[in-house]
Amino acid sequence: MANITVWKFEDAEGAQRALGVLSGLQKEHLIEIQDAAVVSWPQGQKKPRTQQAVNLVGVGALDGAFWGMLFGFIFFVPLLGAAIGALSGALSGHFTDYGINDDFIKNVRESITEGTSALFLMTGEVTLDKVEEALKGEKMELIKSNLSNEQEAKLREHFSAS
């Protein structure tokens, strides 16, 4: 079973750094990254940059169009205003099929701001203690996951800055 998590970092490079660490852990078979994407919003930029981690993932990865539509819906649709209200409703219905609802969109939109970054991960098997050790010291916060409450609480305990 794949798990989807979204992690926020307190600087624009944090998500890319963490992805680099996770890439190394994947080579050691300590985490199975099925798909990943990074959103980076440097200070002074009007909008965030997005990047799918194509080189890290193989068969079973989400289509780039999925990430493009999701990021467009989260970060760019609000900028276009009411003129595309119907499109917004259609996209919202589309993402609900994947367990991505309006609360998810709103939470991510409010959390990822100028000067921060986010790592969107779809993972399989994870050796949590090894991943925790490798990412120790990174200031990161779990924004959203499709894990059980117990699994999510454990992730928050291990990785959240609070």
Image (tube, rainbow, N blue to C red):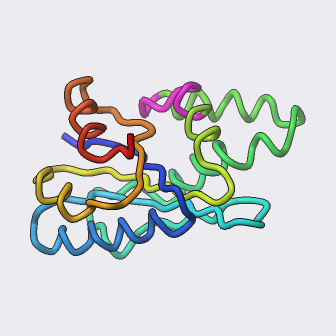
Is residue 12 depicted above or below 27 in this figure?
A: above
From the viewer's perspective, tell me whether residue 82 is left or right of residue 49.
right
Residue 27, position in %: x, y?
A: 15, 74
Residue occupying the point 75% across, 43% down: 77
Residue occupying the point 32% across, 61% down: 137
Camera-side residue of 14 and 30: 14
Quarter of the image that includes the N terminus: top left
From the viewer's perspective, tell me whether residue 39 is left or right of residue 21.
right
In the displayed image of the protein, which residue is found farthest to the right? 83
Quarter of the image that includes the C terminus: top left
Residue 25, position in %: x, y?
A: 18, 69
Residue occupying the point 10% across, 66% down: 29
Residue 141, position in %: x, y?
A: 42, 45
Is residue 117 depicted above or below 88 in this figure?
A: below
Residue occupying the point 64% across, 60% down: 115
Span of residues in magenta: 97-105
Q: Which of the 4 image quadrants contains residue 135?
A: bottom left
Residue 72, position in %: x, y?
A: 66, 50
- Residue 158 among magenta residues: no
Q: Which of the 4 image quadrants contains residue 33?
A: bottom left
Is residue 161 depicted above or below 82 in this figure?
A: below
Q: Across the whole image, how many numbered discs are drawn on residues? A: 0
